[in-house]
Amino acid sequence: MQGNSEESGAEGAVPTRKGRVYGWALLIALGGLLFGFDTGVISGALLFVKHDFALNSFEQGTVVSILLIGAMIGALSAGRLADRVGRRHALVFEGVVFAIGTLIAVAAIDYWMLLAGRLVLGLAIGGASATVPIYLSELSPNAIRGRTLSFNQLFITGGILIAYLVNLVFAGAGDWRAMFAVGFVPAAVLVAGALWVLPESPSWLLAQGRADEARRVVRRVMGEKQADELVDSIQQATEESGGHLGDEDEGGWRHLARKQVRPALVVGLVLAAIQQFGGINTIIYYAPSVIEKTGLSASNSIFYSVFIGLINLLMTVVALRLVDRVGRRFLLLASLGGMTLTMALLGLSFVIGLSPELSLLFMVAYIAVYAGGLGPIFWVLIGEVFPPTVRAAGSSAATAVNWASNFVVGLLFLPVAGVIGQGETFWIFGVICLAGLFFVLRYVPETRGESPDEVARGLQQRFAGREG
């Protein structure tokens, strides 16, 4: 729900029904909760699945990693789906697929059936991870767009924490089926909410030539005159930037290679890779084993996971409160600087053998600075940097790279750490964070309160070598 910055970027122009926008955003962000829940729940479930199905180490690895492969495929397909059927129906479809995957996993009678369920779950969360940012972006006024887009990361971290708590509840009984089954609840709420509560994106409706419907959606959150002016400005911007969403030549993948769109694509893809190659999932996935190597007991690994998940969630709340006040660039730069420093210190603690408590402190500090910046801001920016006609395709591409990077880091961390040492591996992550810091300084403009045209101009200026 974006217009020029004068109409919707000033606090005074925020709709009087801002609460309704937040309500919609919370429902949409349930897609992020599914993402987080199914990423986190496997850490506890696998402790019991491996015994019930007598899984070897390779089979255990595939049960974890098949979800990431499915997510890559789902993310790549989501853009075209969202452009063809609309953001709302795409989210309904993804919620249904998640529910089906959950049922398959819960009913699994052997390794192969569980693998199939995890693949289906991956397709759903990959699709939702690409759909949610564009849907949130297109339903949010500029002045609160950063906050609503941050709901995605908030719900991802919330989903991870809920998964850890669910694991804790059912660990005593070893009931891994119940752990998976809990995911059916948010999936059902998402489908019901999308069908009966959520409106379609005004930008998508306008691109389909359904201006009257778009006006009705916008009038639900702002005055009639203001809504008409905003719809007219979105319509003009859509027409100027390429025509109709869902057209393979204009609004699809080929459009991403156009000179005007290329800076947005570079920013989206590079930040997607840095978010993962900066080392976050080595902490999320391998925290118990990392903690164990510091000399502290890791016998209660689920407890450690809950604590790290809580820090992740709390700092995401901090970012949500700051993103529309201090801007995206400041949070990104502060976060990447903090990640560089804490990774360097964490690596040092292993290389020279500092106290276990210091190693744990550096690990928690790393989680905090990541969650307060790069974690949520990546999802904010992929909802903002792409022009309206390629927003779905751009989000798909960036999200797919994010999932692919996640897969590579998860696959290589333990082998690389075994060859060069755990501390030295953390230093590699620190160098990547430092490179990300310089990339943001040079190429990423501030997008707070900016219209799509203003964001595009800022990107062009930075990539042309001028100050933005």
Image (spheres, grey):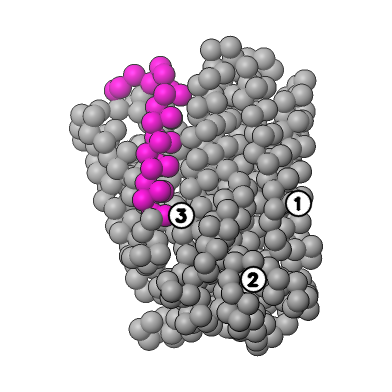
Query: Residue, x 69% and y 34% (percent of image)?
Result: 184
State the residue in front, 405 or 460.
460
Name the main secondary structure of what is drawn in magenta.
helix
Query: Residue, x 36% and y 24% (percent of image)?
Result: 292
Q: Which residues are magenta?
A: 295-320
Please tell me how crowded label 3 is: few (under 14), some (14-19), or many (20+) other residues with Cα within 10 Å: many
Q: Quadrant of residue 135?
A: bottom right
Q: Amino acid at mark 2?
A: Val
Gap in angstroms between the C-alphas marked 1 and 2: 18 Å
Residue 75 placed where, x, y %? 66, 55
For disc 3, the marked residue is 376
Please tell me how crowded label 1 is: few (under 14), some (14-19), or many (20+) other residues with Cα within 10 Å: some
For disc 1, the marked residue is 195
State the residue in front, 362 or 138.
138
Gap in angstroms between the C-alphas marked 1 and 3: 27 Å
> What SS does tag 2 mark?
helix
Residue 144 placed where, x, y %? 47, 65
Name above or below for residue 14 compared with residue 164: below
For disc 2, the marked residue is 218
- The verdict on residue 358 being magenta is no
> What SS does tag 1 mark?
helix
Residue 376 placed where, x, y %? 46, 54
Q: Amino acid at mark 3?
A: Pro
Q: Amino acid at mark 1?
A: Leu
Name above or below for residue 467 compared with residue 347: below
Name above or below for residue 20 compared with residue 441: above
Give whichever of discs 3 and 2 has the lower sequence position: 2
Residue 408 placed where, x, y %? 54, 47
Instruction: Return the mark for residue 12.
Output: none
